[in-house]
Image (cartoon, rainbow, N blue to C red):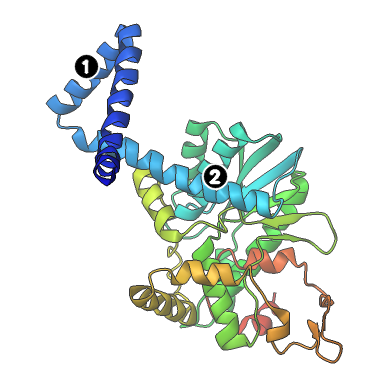
Amino acid sequence: MEKGREQNRWTRPKLIKSNLYLIIKDFFNSCPTIFCAFVNFLAACQTFRFEGEVKKLFVESKTKTKLLKRMGEAIRDFSMIRDGDRVMVCLSGGKDSYTMLDLLLDVQKRAPVRFEILAVNLDQKQPDFPEHILPDYLEEIGVPYRIVQEDTYSIVTRLVPEGKTFCSVCSRLRRGILYNVAIEENCTKIALGHHADDIINTFLLNLFFVGQLKAMPPILRSDDGRNTVIRPLAYAQEKDIAKFADEKQFPIIPCNLCGSQPNLKRARVKRLINELAKEIPHVRSSIMTALTNVTGSHLLDTELYDFENFAPLVKELKPLHGSVEKELDAVFDHSEAEIVTNLLAKI
């Protein structure tokens, strides 16, 4: 009896493969034109040594499917997009925002709700900025867009002392412009390209340097109720986004045209996660899961848990909690904030 079971276990996969073969064979027999075209395509690829391109098509499909699944889960879990929304997609020219736009266009076709997409880029007149790349790309894929031209670069270079980074001041100037554009264009949502790695890094930065258990919110409504920031890539890992961007060959615009230096603290936290991942491969997934699995009674926040009566509390949000402006700061702000307040006072 055991022998029969063992034999059946090993023969079942063969039967499945055999049945699959018959199904495919019947399909091609009923569609000889498709079969001939498929054979000719493979032959041409082999002749011109395009085998790698054929594999790339299947790999891209697998990568995109994974990212679409993550985006769909985030949109569903946090009710990011509703029927009738007009979503302003902030497009910087980097891999994250390109990927976000590409995936949202796919979601737009499949979603049970109707929503509009408007791609928006802010041209800050940085030296050597390739002004034609984004308009050409957006025209090619047929996406409605708006390029906003504001010379914030000259203001930043005038205000920031030599040797200091531009990003904090630059992002604060940029955020006001983007917020106003969203209102002008009647956009109900502002989509930012932050992903899971950004959320993890921000969480650890706040933990280590600020003394606060706080990450990036996947969705945040402004205090005035006029707009909402969403992060559709909240569940997507950077490595998958980078892989997809490479497969799609997006026309990437470098983010260091202004010559500014990155945030050393953020870079250090990123290195820490990479080092931990070598010993704990699932460390990123573990941190993301922890952010969805909070036990208030096991923390020390008396506004979150009533330790006298052993009951959970609803913590009152501080003023300016729903600050869309601050969230827009985070789009490009990679620097230290020590000089920002004094510099902005000079504007």
Task: Please state if 176 lies on the left or on the right of 285 as rendered.
Answer: right
Classify 10 Å Cα crowding around label 2: few (below 14), some (14-19), many (20 and above). Answer: many
Query: Label 2: which residue?
Result: 101
Task: Name the residue at the bottom extreme.
Answer: 308
The image position of residue 142, as x and y in percent, is 54, 31
The image shows residue 31 at horizontal and vertical percentages of 34, 9
**If you read the primary sequence from the N terminus, does the residue marked by circle 2 or circle 1 appear first?**
1
Front-most of 178 and 59? 59
* Residue 197 left/right relative to 109: left
The dot on residue 40 is 1
- Type of residue at label 1? Asn
Q: Nearer the viewer, residue 139 or 347?
A: 139
x and y percentages locating residue 157 in the rendered image: 53, 72
In the picture, residue 207 is in which quadrant? bottom right
Task: Answer whether residue 69 is visible to the viewer in this image.
Answer: yes
Q: Residue at x 43, y 65 (%)?
A: 256
Please determine whether, in this image, residue 51 is positioned above or below residue 250. above
Q: Position of residue 100 (x, y in %)?
A: 53, 48
Query: In this rendering, is residue 276 above or below 259?
Result: below
Quadrant housing residue 19 = top left
The C terminus: image quadrant: bottom right
Between 307 and 93, the one nearer to me in the picture: 307
Q: Residue at x 72, y 42 (%)?
A: 86
Q: Is residue 171 above or below residue 186?
A: below
